[in-house]
């Protein structure tokens, strides 16, 4: 019957039967604890299919390592004649987890000595699992009790404490173990709240459990270990078994804080009512349906009626003005449905029957679940404010009408510079709508160049300045700029705090334009006078020198004739200048009468070209003409129209580098004849194009004055063309890109058809030491006349008419004195002086500037260039003689 080694078990037949019949796992071991035999039931329980695989194995090796020492200890006890017992976990051969209750005992032989050991293992897995679940349940229950914020304790039938959770013990000032098994009435319930004794026989808690009744007490006192009372509410739940009382569970809560809160709430309610009655507003509260809960005494004082728990509709119908009733109910319904603040202004009837305006406001109060439980509101008398608003509105309406009709712009801004009010004129000036401007910063419509100025004004107003008047630029919506005079005044509140500003804005763009035009005209007038002085001094110089020369004796007939010719040429030149001035004056004042007649425009062009051909040839220009094959007629004064075209062609020739091209074109249109004069010259800036036909208008003044002129020609052209009911315009792509002038004249239908300074006095008659001298002047007559005068004094004089030739000759002859004109072409006199000073041969030559420019700035510039002396045309001969005498004495 044994699985293995049955012949050596040492058991009787009877014992062997018992060995096999046992439901437990029975194992026979040798004294060393090796496995000799195992009953069949044991093999089944252990899920061993082949006992031979484990026979003779140490029993301990069948157990997990954690339990092997316990197994060896039990075997040792059995070997010593005792019984070894233990409970441990060991999985079966197939891994099924099981718990075992194991007994190991000796098997005595006939002589009483143990020769074998018997191990009986009972499967207690089910029992162990139940025990563990019980332990887990008890632990959970303990944790549940300890996690409760309420005090919980159990009572045995004899009313002793069976358990007390930590919260309850802490409330009472004990440790839980201190209370187990003790009568708690004597410990925590022995006196009433007033300190009087509380006998056990009177205790409501004990009497309830004795009867098996449940009990709930809201206001009671327990006593702490330190003798202080604690306000509690408690509940008692008896435990019955077979109708008999077997114990009870008591739960209790510390209501000290709740009691204090209740008292505080009562005090708060009193304070609220006192405060509500003390303030001037009507204070009220209603429930979630709108029924009155509380109205302070101001309601009764004002209305003369006590509030009844009526609905809002009833209250409104009774006390609110009939015109305000429906709006009030709509606002209330909306607030109630949307659970939002109720706000309304309406009139409430007083006890005297008078209606006054009130601002009514109520806030909903929600419970923890989010349900409205009450509304709290106030009704504030705003009747005086309302009346003031009506008056203010009427006043503001009148003011806005005045502002809207004002011919000036009006803008109001808040303390942050944001626009709050504008009138139509302001919108019109800037090109915005009122909606676009409201809320916009003033800086956003201010031109960049005026932002800093505007910010300074705002800062000054904030710091207490009352106002400013400034000229500033605004930026229109289309990006263009507008000049305006803004009179800015600060706005202050009742406490004198800065609240904003108001500005009266006047468009002065046209005034600014006129001012700039006047400044430009004034500047051009000054430039014209300077040019006129220069142009008049140039012919006066050779005339004066000629007169001085004629006063000298022993002049040859040829020299007298030459001198006379110079005087005649310069007088004609001066006469031309004066005639130009008088001509412009007469034309601009409308004193010129035209000798009008039908004219073939081609004849006018032929005469004009003939006049300017010498100048064109002298500068090696090419004149191209594209004339219409028709013979267009115009009504006009031939002399004046020739003057117009000659002026335009003359300008084209003068203001263009040598060898340039001039194009003259005509075009016939239905009602006009168009004449174009185009050149490849110096061109014009946009600024000069805009004022090309103004009096005295010329390009930037240069010291060489190589092109000459007084700036009268184009002004005369425009005046003459306008007298012929025509127009003249000019275009230029910019500096260096040439110009184009276009004259348009009304078409007749075929059926209608030399400079030099003046020398005054006779100082040059006195002999001085002979000097080597050089005169440099581009005016041939002026240079020749000055040289002749100097030669009569015994000086050796070389004459040059351009700077580069003068430099070369100066290196060759090393003159002691050089008289230089400043207005030389290509290289002006200042630059020539610097170069003469730079070369060794003329480094110490006395340089004298002879010029028509006599301003102090001109004099300083010449001295800086290296001149020793400066003489203004016409030259003072006495000064010149003194200078030369001084040089001769060196």
Image (spheres, rainbow, N blue to C red):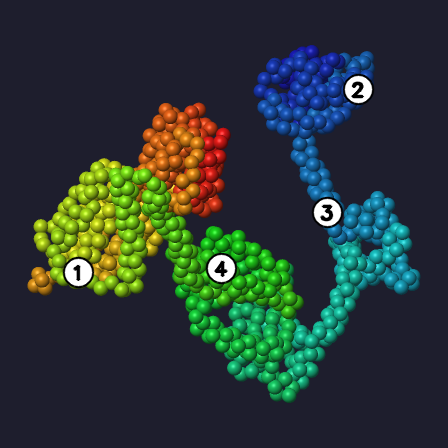
User: Residue farthest to the front?
Assistant: 554
Residue 715 is at least partly visible in this image: no
Residue at label 2? 77
Query: Residue 870 appears in which quarter of the rendering?
Result: top left
Q: Are marks 2 and 3 in contact (CB under 8 Å)?
A: no
Query: Residue 23 appears in which quarter of the rendering?
Result: top right
Q: Is residue 25 left or right of residue 881?
A: right
Crowding near the residue tagged with mark 4, few <14, some 14–19, many ≥20 C-alpha atoms within 10 Å: some
Query: Residue 20 appears in which quarter of the rendering?
Result: top right
Question: Residue 178, position in %: x, y?
Answer: 86, 45
Between disc 2 and disc 3, whose residue precedes?
2
Q: Is residue 207 left or right of residue 147?
A: right
Between disc 3 and disc 4, whose residue precedes?
3
Q: Secondary structure at mark 1?
A: strand
Crowding near the residue tagged with mark 2, few <14, some 14–19, many ≥20 C-alpha atoms within 10 Å: some
Which of discs 2 and 3 lies nearer the camera? The answer is: 3
Which of discs 4 and 1 lies nearer the camera? The answer is: 1
Q: Is residue 474 above or below residue 361?
A: above
Closer to the camera in the image, 363 or 604: 604
Q: Is residue 315 left or right of residue 680?
A: right
Count how many numbered circles sit on residues in the image: 4
Residue 636: which disc?
Answer: 1
Residue at label 4? 471
Residue at label 3? 147
Q: Is residue 582 left or right of residue 486?
A: left
Could you give the CA–CA distance between mark 3 and mark 4, rounded to whole angstroms? 81 Å
Could you give the CA–CA distance between mark 1 and mark 3, rounded to whole angstroms? 121 Å
Q: Are marks 2 and 1 in contact (CB under 8 Å)?
A: no
Closer to the camera in the image, 869 or 91: 869
Q: Is residue 598 above or below residue 628?
A: below
Crowding near the residue tagged with mark 1, few <14, some 14–19, many ≥20 C-alpha atoms within 10 Å: many
């Amino acid at each position: 019957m044994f699985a293995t080694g049955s012949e050596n078990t040492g058991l009787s037949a009877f014992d062997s039967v018992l060995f096999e019949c046992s439901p437990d796992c029975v194992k026979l071991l040798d004294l060393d604890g090796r496995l000799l035999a195992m009953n069949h039931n044991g093999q089944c329980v252990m899920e061993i299919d082949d006992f031979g695989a484990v026979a003779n194995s140490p029993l301990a090796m069948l157990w997990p390592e954690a339990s092997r020492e316990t197994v060896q200890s039990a075997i040792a006890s059995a070997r010593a004649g005792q019984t070894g017992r233990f409970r441990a976990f060991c999985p079966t051969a197939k891994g099924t987890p099981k718990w075992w209750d194991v007994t190991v005992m000796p098997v005595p032989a006939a002589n009483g000595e143990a020769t074998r050991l018997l191990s009986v293992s009972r499967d207690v897995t089910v029992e162990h699992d139940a025990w563990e679940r019980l332990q887990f349940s008890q632990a959970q229950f303990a944790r549940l009790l300890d996690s409760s914020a309420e005090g919980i304790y159990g009572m045995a039938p004899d009313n002793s404490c069976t358990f007390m959770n930590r919260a309850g013990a802490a409330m009472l000032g004990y440790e839980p173990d201190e209370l187990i098994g003790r009568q708690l009435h004597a410990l925590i319930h022995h006196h009433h709240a007033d300190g009087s004794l509380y006998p056990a026989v009177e205790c409501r808690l004990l009497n309830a459990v004795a009867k098996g009744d449940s009990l709930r007490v809201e206001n009671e006192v327990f006593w702490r270990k330190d003798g202080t009372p604690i306000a509690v509410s408690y509940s008692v739940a008896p435990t019955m078994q077979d109708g008999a009382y077997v114990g009870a569970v008591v739960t209790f809560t510390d209501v000290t804080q709740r009691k204090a809160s209740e008292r505080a709430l009562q005090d708060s309610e009193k304070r609220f009512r006192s405060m509500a009655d003390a303030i001037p507003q009507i204070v009220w509260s209603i429930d979630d349906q709108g029924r009155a809960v509380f109205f302070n005494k101001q309601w009764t004082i004002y209305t003369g009626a006590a509030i009844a728990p009526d609905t809002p509709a009833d209250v409104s119908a009774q006390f609110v003005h009939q015109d305000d009733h429906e709006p009030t109910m709509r606002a209330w319904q909306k607030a109630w449905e949307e659970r939002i603040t109720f706000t309304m202004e309406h009139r409430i009837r007083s006890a005297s029957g008078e209606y006054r305006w009130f601002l009514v406001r109520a806030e909903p109060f929600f419970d923890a679940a989010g349900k409205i439980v009450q509304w709290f509101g106030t009704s504030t008398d705003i009747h005086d404010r309302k009346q003031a608003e009506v008056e203010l509105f009427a006043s503001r309406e009148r003011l806005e009408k005045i502002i809207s009709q004002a011919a000036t712009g009006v803008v109001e801004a808040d303390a942050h510079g944001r626009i709050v009010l504008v009138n139509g004129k302001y919108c019109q000036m800037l090109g915005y709508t009122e909606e676009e401007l409201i809320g916009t910063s003033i800086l956003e419509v201010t031109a960049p160049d005026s932002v800093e100025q505007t910010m300074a004004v705002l800062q000054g107003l904030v710091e207490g300045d009352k106002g400013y008047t400034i000229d500033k630029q605004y930026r229109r919506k289309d990006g263009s700029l507008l000049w305006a005079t803004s009179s800015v005044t600060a706005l202050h509140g009742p406490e004198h705090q800065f609240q904003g500003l108001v500005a009266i804005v006047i468009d002065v763009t046209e005034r600014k334009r006129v001012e700039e035009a006047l400044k430009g005209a004034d500047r051009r007038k000054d430039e014209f006078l300077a040019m006129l002085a220069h142009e008049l001094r140039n012919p006066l110089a050779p005339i004066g020198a000629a007169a001085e020369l004629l006063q000298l004796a022993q002049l040859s007939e040829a020299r007298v004739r030459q001198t006379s010719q110079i005087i005649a040429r310069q007088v004609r030149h001066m006469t031309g200048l004066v005639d130009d001035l008088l001509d412009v004056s007469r034309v601009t004042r409308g004193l010129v009468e035209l000798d009008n007649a039908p004219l073939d425009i081609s004849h006018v062009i032929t005469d004009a070209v003939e006049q300017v051909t010498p100048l064109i040839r002298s500068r090696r220009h090419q004149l191209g003409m594209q004339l219409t094959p028709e013979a267009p007629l115009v009504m006009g004064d031939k002399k004046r129209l020739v003057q117009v075209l000659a002026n335009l062609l003359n300008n084209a020739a003068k203001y263009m580098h040598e060898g340039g091209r001039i194009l003259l074109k005509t075009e016939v249109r239905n009602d006009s004849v168009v004449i174009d004069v185009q050149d490849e010259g110096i061109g014009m800036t946009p600024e000069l194009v805009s004022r090309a036909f103004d009096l005295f208008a010329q390009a930037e003044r240069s010291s060489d004055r190589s092109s000459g002129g007084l700036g009268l020609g184009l002004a005369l052209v425009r005046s003459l063309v306008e007298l012929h009911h025509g127009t003249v315009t000019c275009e230029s792509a910019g500096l260096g890109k040439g110009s184009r002038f276009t004259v348009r004249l009304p078409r007749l239908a075929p059926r209608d058809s030399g400079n030099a300074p003046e020398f005054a006095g006779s100082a040059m008659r006195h002999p001085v030491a002979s000097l080597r001298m050089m005169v440099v002047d581009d005016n041939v007559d002026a240079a020749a006349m000055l040289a002749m005068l100097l030669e009569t004094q015994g000086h050796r004089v070389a004459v040059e008419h351009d700077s580069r030739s003068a430099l070369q000759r100066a290196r060759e002859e090393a003159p002691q004195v050089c008289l230089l004109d400043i207005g030389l072409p290509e290289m002006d006199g200042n630059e020539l002086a610097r170069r003469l000073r730079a070369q060794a041969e003329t480094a110490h030559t006395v340089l004298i500037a002879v010029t028509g420019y006599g301003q102090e700035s001109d004099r300083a510039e010449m001295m800086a260039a290296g001149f020793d002396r400066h003489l203004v045309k016409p030259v003072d001969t006495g000064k010149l003689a003194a200078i030369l005498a001084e040089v001769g004495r060196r």
